[in-house]
Image (spheres, coloured by chain):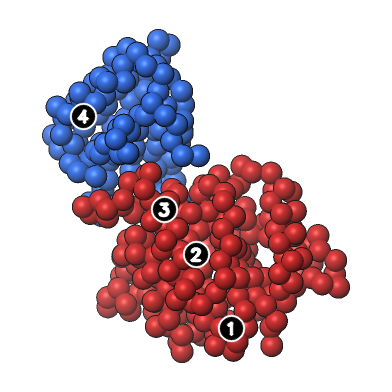
Amino acid sequence: MEKHVVVIYPHPDDEAFGAAGTIAQFRAEGVPVTYLCGTLGEMGRNMGAPPFANRESLPMIRKQELQNACNVLDIDLKMLGYRDKTLEFEDRQEIAKRLKTMLEEIKPSLVITHYPGHAVHPDHNALGAAAVEAVGLMDPSIRPTVWAQAITNSFMEDLGKPDIINDISPYFEKKMDTIKAHKSQADGILGNFKKANKLAKDVQDAAKQRLGIERFYIWEF
Amino acid sequence: MKPIDIENAQQMLESFINKEVYVHVETTNGAYASHFNEKAYNVGVFVRNAKVTFSQAKIVRDGNVYRAGLKMPMGWIYAEGLTDWEIYEYDKLLLAGHDREGRLMVAMQISETPFDY
């Protein structure tokens, strides 16, 4: 059993879409989970129709949604305070050192993050790279396992079969509740899944197909 | 935000003329455009808190959308595809263009005080 799991993703809602089922499973087993969330998703585009948010009010709305989502999952939250879409332009070493310090304090047995270079959004790739680097800098005797998540359309061809293929059906409702906690983002993104999947019956069906299994690669140091 | 009211937006734009102001301009089709549609391109530009002055400012209607342009001593700033506006925190003019689904495509914002980080 894991001792403590740390999830490192850049945006409020990455934890919901990417790993909420796995997180819920760890919580059900009594494993503490801490989410290090890189930004407040300041550059989100979904403002609602008619708009309920604007570029200036969105960060605080998403911060509240993030806290709500972490309450749904019953996990600890630490916000790193970077700005959405700028992580790749930061000094990666600096981010890695900061994450390393935090990890040495939390002492997780497992870190979940994005697979650098295979995670579509530039923030995913940049923070994933910094997280992997941070763990790599840690003394091997205290180094946690890293599960890296790839989300490109071609990741299976590029990286082979994921090491962890987690059917999260028992926790799917919890996952949807976590996604819905990110009210400003949920409808727009779930709608996109439906649009991209012509065979899906409805939004729920498209979500189940897309989100029902969470896959990770074990990073080799 | 509400659909642009051109007369009041024009008046607000003019209130910034010949003052040092902070401008936010942005256009984006999101970080996932080519993820969901392989034929699409990801494009965007983002400028936050550029400190500028302008001597002329105009908002122009074109069908259901608007363009706004600022004439600076050494150049121009303009934005196209604007649909909604808001006066935010009393003195900040926010102009934005949203698509049918309510996604922001373009924004131009002007304020006498800097926008938050």
Residue B23 in picture, x, y percent from top left = 40, 28
Question: Residue drawn 69% across and 51% down?
Answer: A95
**Callout 2 crowding tier (Cα within 10 Å): few <14, some 14–19, many ≥20:** some
Q: Is residue B42 above or below residue B73?
A: below
Label 3 marks a residue whose chain is A
Q: Is residue B106 above or below residue A219?
A: above
Query: Does residue B10 appear left or right of residue A121 in this picture?
Result: left
| Separation of residues labelled 1 and 2 (CA atoms) | 17 Å
Task: Give me the chain that's red.
Answer: A
- The residue that label 1 is drawn on is A26
Do badges 2 and 3 share one subunit?
A: yes
Query: At label 3, which amino acid type do we have?
Result: Met
Query: At label 2, which amino acid type do we have?
Result: Asp
Q: Is residue A56 visible?
A: yes
- Determine contact: label 2, label 4, CB under 8 Å: no
| Separation of residues labelled 3 and 4 (CA atoms) | 25 Å
Residue A57 in picture, x, y percent from top left = 36, 48
**Callout 1 crowding tier (Cα within 10 Å): few <14, some 14–19, many ≥20:** some
Residue A60's disc is 3
- The residue that label 4 is drawn on is B9
- The residue that label 2 is drawn on is A14
Element under disc 2: helix
Task: Nearest to the eye among marks 1 and 2: give it.
Answer: 1
Task: Nearest to the eye among marks 3 and 4: give it.
Answer: 3
Q: Of label 1 and label 3, which has the lower sequence position?
A: 1
Q: Of label 2 and label 3, which has the lower sequence position?
A: 2
Query: At label 4, which amino acid type do we have?
Result: Ala
| Separation of residues labelled 1 and 3 (CA atoms) | 29 Å
